[in-house]
Image (cartoon, rainbow, N blue to C red):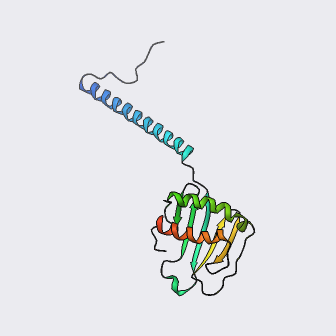
């Protein structure tokens, strides 16, 4: 069988120009293939370590009195990867002691969360707290008679707001 050329042979400059176009096309395909490979590797690496960490718990702090001041409302979400989000903002790193305290506290308050504990809120409080996780919810006031682990929630909330999120209180 005889080979039939679909295009006529080009001579001189036209031939070199066509070769330049083909070479450019091949280079762009190679670059595209490299980019796809790098993105694939990046996604693959991100899939190994780039998973979103589960939330340990969420603390919703609401002002209950006039002495709480502006900006006192807080929605703090503490994640297992050592970050916190304040009021829907970006994740920010918690200092190491607060990471350890968050993980310990999550275990310690779990029984209260499971039974959906609600502590009385005597008058005169500055903040009301609602703590939630996937197991349940607990609510109390800063003037409620509380077990020690829930008093620690108040301290952690203030420390995380100030140290990780840069809030005044």
- Left or right: residue 47 versus residue 150 is left
The residue nearer to you, when weighing 128 against 100, is 100
Residue 158 coordinates in the image, percent (x, y): 53, 71
Residue 70 coordinates in the image, percent (x, y): 48, 81
The extreme right residue here reads 115
Point 49% across, 65% down: residue:
89
What number of labels is visible?
0
Q: Is residue 59 above or below residue 22?
A: below
The extreme top residue here reads 1
Res 105 quadrant in image: bottom right
Point 38% across, 35% down: residue:
28
- Left or right: residue 1 versus residue 148 is left
- Left or right: residue 20 versus residue 149 is left
Q: Is residue 35 above or below residue 119?
A: above
Res 145 quadrant in image: bottom right
The extreme left residue here reads 13
Q: Is residue 71 above or below residue 108?
A: below
Residue 138 coordinates in the image, percent (x, y): 68, 71
Residue 144 coordinates in the image, percent (x, y): 66, 80
Res 9 quadrant in image: top left
The residue nearer to you, when weighing 3 against 93, is 93
- Left or right: residue 143 versus residue 96 is right
Point 51% across, 85% down: residue:
67
Point 56% across, 70% down: residue:
155
């Amino acid at each position: 069988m005889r080979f039939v050329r679909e295009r006529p042979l080009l001579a001189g400059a036209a031939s070199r120009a066509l070769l330049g176009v083909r070479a450019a096309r091949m280079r762009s395909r190679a670059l595209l293939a490299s980019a796809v490979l790098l993105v694939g590797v990046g996604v693959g690496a991100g899939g190994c370590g780039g998973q979103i960490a589960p939330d340990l718990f969420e603390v919703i702090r609401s002002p209950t009195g006039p002495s709480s001041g502006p900006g006192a409302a807080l929605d703090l979400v503490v994640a297992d990867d050592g970050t916190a989000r304040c009021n829907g903002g970006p994740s920010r790193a918690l200092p190491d002691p607060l990471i350890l305290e968050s993980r310990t506290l999550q275990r310690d308050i779990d029984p209260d969360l499971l039974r959906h504990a609600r502590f009385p809120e005597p008058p005169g409080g500055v903040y009301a707290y609602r703590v939630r996780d996937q197991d349940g919810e607990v609510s109390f006031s800063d003037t409620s008679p509380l077990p020690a682990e829930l008093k620690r929630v108040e301290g952690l909330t203030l420390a995380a707001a100030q140290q990780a999120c840069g809030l005044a209180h």
